Amino acid sequence: MAHCPSLRSESCVNCRVRELCLPGGVDSADAQRLANLIPQRMKIRKGAALFHPADPLRFIYVVHHGFFKTSFLSADGREQLTGFQMSADLLGIDAISSGRYTCDAIALEDSEVCPIHFSQLEVLSRELPSLHHKLNRILSQEVVRNQQLLMWMGNLNAEERLGAFLLDLSARMQERGYSPHAFLLRMTREDIAAHLGLRLETVCRAIAYLRGKGLVRISGRAVEIVSHERLKALGTSGSTPRKLRLAPVNAG
Amino acid sequence: MAHCPSLRSESCVNCRVRELCLPGGVDSADAQRLANLIPQRMKIRKGAALFHPADPLRFIYVVHHGFFKTSFLSADGREQLTGFQMSADLLGIDAISSGRYTCDAIALEDSEVCPIHFSQLEVLSRELPSLHHKLNRILSQEVVRNQQLLMWMGNLNAEERLGAFLLDLSARMQERGYSPHAFLLRMTREDIAAHLGLRLETVCRAIAYLRGKGLVRISGRAVEIVSHERLKALGTSGSTPRKLRLAPVNAG
DNA sequence: CGTTGGTTTGACTTCGATCAACCAGTGTGG
DNA sequence: CCACACTGGTTGATCGAAGTCAAACCAACG
């Protein structure tokens, strides 16, 4: 069971995305103990799967660098893309409930992940309250994130959904030290569509719409966000799809 | 801080829904220690809120009996109903990530909840591995549940969504020892609509459709599921909304 | 009783799905 | 080298599911 320390690529302690990741808020000595749970980083080639639905849970994975998508198919062949994961994001936490992964995790570019033996993580987090709390927060965060996505699907039209999606990506890029104004998409239009509950043609048209309004510049995978403010304000006024039906304002 | 044990209504140990709830899989002595974290059950009247968005997290709540809905409003007045909670379901886990609740929790009937001091729960779960694991599983379960809902919104049409919703309710009734064939809805059509990303008129029409097909009998809040099998099979054949576009089958 | 909140049904409109054509790269084999 | 297939992206025309607006219905209740 014991791994030779020299095999470990690097420690969590001086990882670029440490604060966003599991060791965020955990002090350095303890972060090193977490790092010791990671046998060795794994390289995943573009298009390859990290795990499949029904595989038994042994590890959860942190994306070290690269980009993933997670998606699942229902019995009758419908696909839902549940999320895109970038560095410091966790993969596999859906598996904790049943002990088996519920989705596919596919690398969208050559990537590297840190596998963490889950039951060892549970044991260690009993010893380290800050790690324990961080894990709980990450799980809860995932719930909130999914609820946000739900809100997009339930309340926003195609253009607004795409706008929200781009702003979300932008914010996550910024968290990781990249420019929030310009970045490259790692996924296809079809992936975006499967994520937002649309079809790829509709995503294209939504892009054309935002471009036409001068809110973004998008050609191929290259995105430039011209105005975060105006993009955010997309839904606020103008068309009112599925907003709360307000009580009529009676002056008398 | 110490509460007189005599104040505690009852213990978790002989609670009807113990296995579904946090003490599920935790042995009786330890379940009693969990019960000791619950100062006293709280009664919530129909229509009242258990908490509001931005309230600081102190307790998470287990529904002991009754029925709740959780929903949130975005800045621009759009509402998304994130879920319905019945006995043994947890309320407030969305708050763990930021320390503040992100949604409203409203009782749909007179209800009773078990408040659990969250930071004490974290401390106790460090001592009791089985409790710790159960908490992780419940959090993960919530992620999976939301992903399921996402799949409904992204891939199913109105009738299929309603069918899936009714089957889900039915399964949860059964888990709790009630009949899966007939039960009462505690929520309005508008609540169902806000949950499924539809409008109430569309929910009404979807009900009429299922009734017309002889799959359910619904009048007012009373639901009878005539055939679980045929209800499940709703999407499987026939119309193919948003299914995977299959590669054309070339014989040559 | 009339009021009120929830539900149902109808007529019409609209957003996004569908089907189809076409384009830009990119790789492959003759 | 060119012909070609192939993948991903864009745009147009058409259609249908669900949204919107409106009216009516019903049970509960003061």
Image (cartoon, coloured by chain):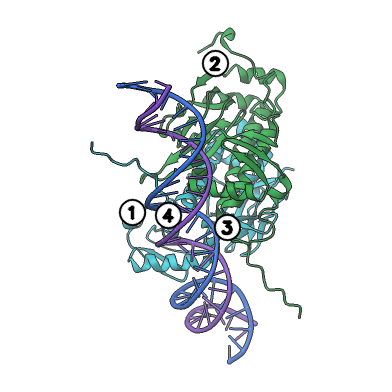
Chain colours: A green, B cyan, C blue, D purple
Pointers 2 and 4 in contact (C-beta within 8 Å):
no
The kind of residue on which mark 1 rests is: Ala
Q: Is residue A32 above or below residue B247?
A: above
Task: Measure the C-alpha gap from mark 3 to mark 1.
Answer: 29 Å
Determine the chain carrying the residue at label 2. A
**What crowding class fits label 4: few (fewer than 14 Cα within 10 Å), some (14-19), or many (20 or more)?**
some
Q: Nearer the viewer, mark 2 or mark 3?
A: 2
Task: Measure the C-alpha gap from mark 2 to mark 3.
Answer: 45 Å
Q: Which is more N-terminal, label 4 or label 3?
A: 3
Mark 4 = which residue? B164
Task: Measure the C-alpha gap from mark 3 to mark 4.
Answer: 19 Å
Mark 2 = which residue? A40
Mark 3 = which residue? B68
The secondary element bearing badge 1 is classed as loop
Q: Is residue D20 above or below residue B140?
A: below
The answer to whether marks 3 and 1 sit on the same chain is: yes
Residue A119: percent from the left, percent from the top? 52, 26
> What residue is at 43 percent from the left and 29 percent from the top?
A56
Determine the chain carrying the residue at label 1. B
